[in-house]
Amino acid sequence: MALPACIRVGVVGVLVAAFTFVGPSAIAAPANIAGMIVFLDPGHSGADDASLSQQAPAGRGDTKNCQASGIATDGGYPEHTLTWDTTLRIRQALTALGVRTAMSRGDDTGVGPCVDQRAAMANALHPNAILSIHADGGPPTGRGFHVLYSSPALNAAQAGPAIQFAQVMRDQLAGSGFVPSTYIGSNGLNPRSDIAGLNLAQFPSIMVVLGNMKNPADSGLMTTPEGRQKYADAVVRGVAGFLGAQPPTTTS
């Protein structure tokens, strides 16, 4: 059966007229990552309806809402648009490195898939890595990124590779000048047991929370093309660093 258009794997760039792209910085990457597959999940969706409150499996025998509506900066810039725009930038850079990508949603206008459906899409591709992009709505005095992974682990991918992925991503974000969260997690890492996409993942999966949309310094980066490109460049370095240390995964 053909995969839906939003999750077909390929190296064709995405052209979205609504967004102005700032050229990505040159990123040195190991040659062996070309041809690897990364599933990209821009958090939330561009529209809300009653389906978002339907219950979906959360991965530990419980359920949670199909999807959440996301948050926004005090100026009204929505999380779903931040994650969409930043993920497109990440995809563009990974494609330039020869990495094959697929995305959980195909636009920023419609209702996106439920959290369990996104995990199923990712698992079906047998990707080398799964990356979800989000932001947070913390106290205005708190700022910084944090990287989530499933804990306690439910399978071998979560027990080892996902933790390594999270650590590499944390190091690359910090090395790019981003501040590890001052209000949640520890040193930029935040192991969680309640994130459905992470719990349901059968391959190395993390969630990067770029920062706090309620903090002026973080939101100042998020609401500019230059700031979103800086986030994207750092995330791509994290992905490339993790992939470069992994053996290729055979797809089926």
Image: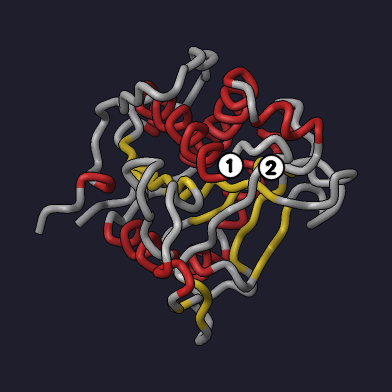
Question: Residue at horizontal 48%, vertical 64%?
Answer: 67
SS under mark 1:
loop
Question: Residue at horizontal 48%, vertical 72%?
Answer: 53
Question: Residue at horizontal 25%, vertical 42%?
Answer: 9
Furthest residue toward right: 141
Residue 208 position in % (x across, y down):
61, 47
Question: Residue at horizontal 85%, vertical 52%?
Answer: 183
- Local crowd size for mark 1, using a 10 Å CA cut-off: few (<14), some (14–19), many (≥20): some
Amino acid type of disc 1? Pro
SS under mark 2:
helix
In which image quadrant can residue 17 be found? top left
- Of 213 and 48, the residue lying toward us: 48
**Mark 1 lies on residue:** 78
- Of 220 and 26, the residue lying toward us: 220
- Work out which quarter of the rendered image holds the C terminus and state it: bottom left
187 relative to 18 in the view: left or right: right
Amino acid type of disc 2? Arg
Q: Which mark is residue 170?
A: 2
Residue 144 position in % (x across, y down):
78, 41
Q: Is residue 175 above or below residue 168?
A: above
Q: Which mark is residue 135?
A: none
